[in-house]
Amino acid sequence: MKRSISILLFSLIPAVACAQNSPDDAACQPPAPPSRTLPSTLTLAAQSEPGDRLQLRLQFLAPNGDALRDLLVYVYHTNAAGVYPPIPGAAGCLRFHGALHGWAYPDSAGFVTVHSVRPGSYPRSTEPAHLHVVVQFKGKRGFYVNDVLFEDDPRVTPAVRAAQQAPGGSGIVRATRTSGTWIAERVIHLSPPTR
């Protein structure tokens, strides 16, 4: 029985080579996670990482409201200074995604909880601060959903808001500060892709 479970989990994590030309190349698949069994909670930044602490809860739901569980979720973002901290010797996508990244499977209610620091905007950029979210259904190619943006970011302009339509719905979240940690939640409605 244990062997069949391992085979099932491995089938959710295809080994995909990635030739990425930029951090946001849509052709890039999520890098393979380091383990076949993953928690629903990600800690991307150590307590020693500079910046304001962030707890982000992402809930993945089917259009009918059922929780999505057989879904590989990959999250990455910049540090508080707006830079992807490099990983020495990194290859493929991780050359661009930096050290603040991780993988998870949603829990029974469809939640993935991310503990990290609040990302900064890219230096000398008008782009809002954001977290990237890539999802991969079993047997399908991974794809980006709209980045998680913060409503209180002055770079979230009317044009940015208008662009937040699909996939997964608007990524703009309201973060509230509680005991020194920014808390935010986003619900993402998804249908399995056809390819």
Image (cartoon, helix red, strand yellow):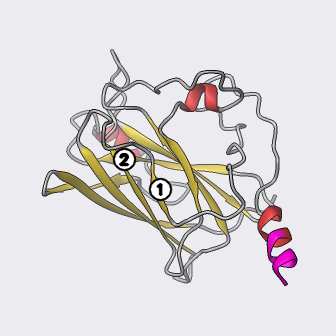
Q: Is residue 139 left or right of residue 69?
A: right
Of all residues shown, which one is farthest toward the left? 179
Give the residue drawn at x 81%, y 62%: 10
On the image, numbered disc 2 is attached to which residue? 116
Residue 2 in the magenta stretch? The answer is: yes
Residue 41 in the magenta stretch? The answer is: no
Q: Residues within 10 Å of mark 2 (few under 14, many from 20)?
A: many
Note whether residue 175 is visible.
no
Which quadrant of the figure has residue 7? bottom right
Cα–Cα gap, marks 1 and 2: 8 Å
Instruction: Residue 173 in the image: state x and y as whole percent.
Output: 31, 55
4 above or below 77? below
137 above or below 132? below
Which quadrant of the figure has residue 94? top right
Find numbered disc 1 in the image and state the secondary structure of the residue it sits on: strand
Note whether residue 153 is visible.
yes
Q: Amino acid at mark 2?
A: Ser
Instruction: Residue 132 in the image: state x and y as whole percent.
Output: 50, 43
- The reply to whether discs 1 and 2 touch (Cβ–Cβ < 8 Å) is yes
Find numbered disc 2 in the image and state the secondary structure of the residue it sits on: strand
Q: Which mark is residue 34?
A: none
Q: Quadrant of the C terminus?
A: bottom right
181 above or below 63? above
Q: Main secondary structure of the magenta part?
A: helix
Q: Amino acid at mark 1?
A: Leu
Give the residue drawn at x 35%, y 38%: 159
Give the residue drawn at x 34%, y 37%: 119
On the image, numbered disc 1 is attached to which residue? 42
* Of the image marks 1 and 2, the number of the one nearer the N terminus: 1
Q: Report the magenta residues as a range.
A: 1-6
Instruction: Residue 90 in the image: state x and y as whole percent.
Output: 65, 26
